Image (cartoon, rainbow, N blue to C red):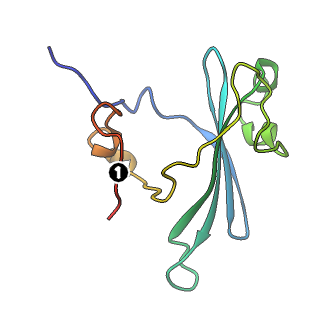
Amino acid sequence: MLMNFRASRANSVFSGSYTFSEDKVEAAILYPGLRPTVLRIRLRLRGTSEGANNRMDLLALLTCGVNENEVSHHDEDILGVVEGWQEDETHNPDVPAISHKRGLTPFVFVPFEEVETSVLNLPVERMDYFVSG
């Protein structure tokens, strides 16, 4: 029996929206399902040389619940739905607001064409931590 331990691109790619202001990026992605959940990300851009913007510092990674009626007509603007929300705010009592703080030091990007083969896409049963180098 062959077991596939990686998530495929087809069922793990979500779209969202972002804003960019000075050196800050804020993004929101809606995970659909029985309990719609929003992933909110706040980043700071910086560079190793003037004008480079080739580094991103993760400032916040939050998940929270939204009501069905909030997202049914905001499919394209989920960031607008959560704009102004506090970090501990949720609009669905079944999905608590959580600020994810553990392991935020390395923020690693995998090129889209390498998602299916990258070791960083292994499930937690096979790899539960990563040390950047």
Q: Position of residue 64 (x, y in %)?
A: 70, 33
Q: Position of residue 23 (x, y in %)?
A: 68, 69
Report the residue at 43% width, 55% height from top: 108
Residue 118 seen in the figure = no
Which of the 4 image quarters holds residue 62? top right
- Image quadrant occupied by the N terminus: top left
In the image, is residue 111 above or below residue 51?
A: above
Report the residue at 76% width, 18% height from top: 68
Query: Looking at the image, which is closer to me, 65 or 98?
Result: 98
In the image, is residue 122 above or below residue 48?
A: above
How many marks are shown on the rendered structure? 1
Is 30 positioned to the left or the right of 2 in the image? Answer: right
- Image quadrant occupied by the C terminus: bottom left
Query: Looking at the image, which is closer to me, 2 or 72?
Result: 2
Is 41 positioned to the left or the right of 129 in the image? Answer: right
Outermost residue, front side = 102
Q: Position of residue 72 (x, y in %)?
A: 76, 21
Residue corresponding to mark 1: 130
Determine crowd level at label 1: few under 14, some 14-19, many 20+ residues with C-alpha closer than 10 A.
Answer: few
Q: Position of residue 104 (x, y in %)?
A: 52, 54
Q: Amino acid at mark 1?
A: Phe
| Label 1 element class | loop
Report the residue at 34% width, 32% height from top: 123
